């Protein structure tokens, strides 16, 4: 029979060392990065408990507990950095999108006026360098695409000039009855704070 001590004639049972379940759990959680912070914190807690458990002579798994603790700390730090950077990008993106609301509104009106052939209204919203002839040509091009239904800006770039002017570059999709067409436009805000379209191209 296993565990029988023939030397003493006794029937004592040999106790085999076991691996700490908390140490294993901590190590596994340390390997997981699927849940922000949660798995890392879980790895730290379980690994700490596992390290304490492995102080007992018959409990193994200290190496797993130490590795789980290190992985948990690394996981938490990585998620903190990722969330901080992601949040910063989100705030920056939102600020740019909010700042571009005025030029986007001007561009929507401008495109609508040009598509409808209302050249005087379009001229009031564009830079003087764009002539009535330029607007007539643009109207003819847009009319060939069918009925204009609107535009959606998908890319925004804001930049400050050497003077007091600010430039907004917009790219996106112009919708017509013939389908969607890519567009790019540039608007400039002068010292008086008025946005003017300086270029508008539809492909």
Image: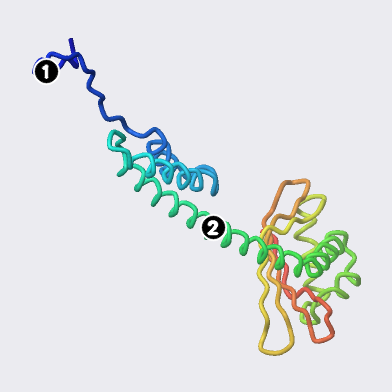
How packed mark 1 is, by other alpha carbons closer than 10 Å (few <14, some 14-19, many 20 or more), is few
Residue at the image point whose x is 22% and y is 22% from the top: 14
Residue at the extreme bottom: 163
Indicate which disc residue 8 carries.
1
As drawn, 84 above or below 3: below
Label at residue 80 = 2
From mark 2 to mark 1, how far is it between C-alphas? 60 Å
Going from N to C along the chain, the mark reached first, 2 or 1, is: 1
Residue 117 located left or right of residue 5: right
- Give 48 or 192, whichever is nearer the viewer: 48
Most foreground residue, 79 or 127: 79
Q: Residue at x 52, y 54 (%)?
A: 79
Snapshot quadrant of residue 10:
top left
Helix, strand or loop at label 1? It is loop
Q: Residues within 10 Å of mark 2 (few under 14, many from 20)?
A: some
From this viewpoint, which residue is outermost toward the top?
A: 1
State the count of labels.
Answer: 2
Task: Give the image location of residue 6, x and y in percent.
Answer: 10, 15
Residue 9 relative to residue 103: left or right: left
Where does residue 186 sit, x and y in percent of width and height? 71, 72
* Quarter of the figure that contains the N terminus: top left
Residue 149: x, y in percent? 82, 51
Image quarter of residue 21: top left
């Amino acid at each position: 029979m296993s565990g029988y001590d023939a030397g003493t004639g006794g029937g004592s049972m040999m106790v085999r060392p076991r691996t700490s379940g908390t140490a294993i759990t901590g190590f596994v959680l340390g390997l997981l990065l699927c849940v922000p912070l949660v798995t890392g914190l879980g790895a730290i807690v379980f690994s700490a408990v596992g390290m304490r458990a492995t102080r007992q002579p018959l409990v193994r798994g200290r190496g797993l507990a130490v590795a789980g603790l290190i992985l948990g700390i690394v996981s938490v730090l990585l998620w903190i950095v990722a969330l901080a950077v992601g949040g910063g990008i989100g705030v920056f993106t939102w600020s740019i999108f909010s700042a571009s609301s005025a030029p986007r509104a001007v561009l929507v009106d401008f495109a609508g006026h040009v598509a409808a052939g209302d050249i005087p209204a379009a001229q009031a919203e564009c830079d003087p360098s764009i002539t009535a002839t330029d607007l007539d040509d643009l109207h003819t091009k847009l009319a060939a695409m069918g009925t204009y239904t609107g535009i959606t800006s998908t890319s925004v770039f804001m930049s400050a000039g050497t003077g007091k002017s600010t430039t907004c570059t917009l790219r996106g999709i112009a919708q017509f009855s013939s389908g969607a067409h890519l567009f790019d436009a540039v608007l400039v805000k002068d010292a008086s704070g008025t946005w003017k379209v300086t270029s508008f191209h539809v492909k």
